[in-house]
Image: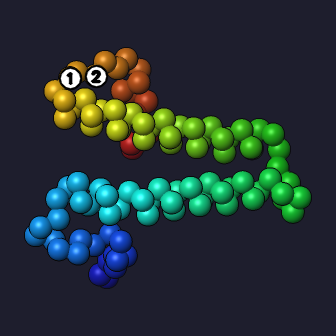
Amino acid sequence: MKKTTKAADTPKEANTETPRDRFMRLAPARTAAALKRIELLGNLTGSGYSYEPEEAQQVLDALFDAVHDLRRKFEKAKARKSGKTVFTFASSRKKEAQLAS
């Protein structure tokens, strides 16, 4: 089965598009899509839905963890590009490895 790709994920000029160009093309659409999904989660707080406080906290914790992981990826990439060493505790690396698997 052949995997289909969205127009926003395929380079317009594959041979000439720089990594910066790809970022500038993909980041806005992906950010908008993520924000829209978060907005849709917010709709679950309406009167047509019922949830326990613990369930709401699990949703918030999952979102917080995802944003935290994204921030760390950007920070690591920035440090790697600048040649700086990033300090992390061993327990943080263990948690990241568990999340990746």
Image quadrant assignment for residue 47: bottom right
Q: CA distance from mark 1 to mark 2?
A: 6 Å
Q: Amino acid at mark 2?
A: Val
**Residue at the spot x=10%, y=70% of the render?**
15
Q: Which residue is disc 1 drawn over?
A: 84
Of tags 1 and 2, the one toward the viewer is 1
Asked if residue 18 is positioned above or below residue 60 in the image, the reply reads below
Q: Nearer the viewer, residue 97 or 60?
A: 60
Q: Amino acid at mark 1?
A: Lys
**Residue at the spot x=66%, y=45% of the render?**
59
**SS of the residue at dot 1?**
loop
**Residue farthest to the right, as pictured:** 47
User: In x, y percent, where is residue 78?
Assistant: 27, 34
Image quadrant assignment for residue 95: top left
Image quadrant assignment for residue 98: top left
In the picture, the quarter occupied by the C terminus is top left
Q: Are marks 1 and 2 in contact (CB under 8 Å)?
A: yes
In the picture, the quarter occupied by the N terminus is bottom left
Asked if residue 63 is positioned above or below residue 9 in the image, the reply reads above
User: In x, y percent, where is residue 60?
Assistant: 66, 41
Asked if residue 48 is positioned above or below residue 99 in the image, the reply reads below
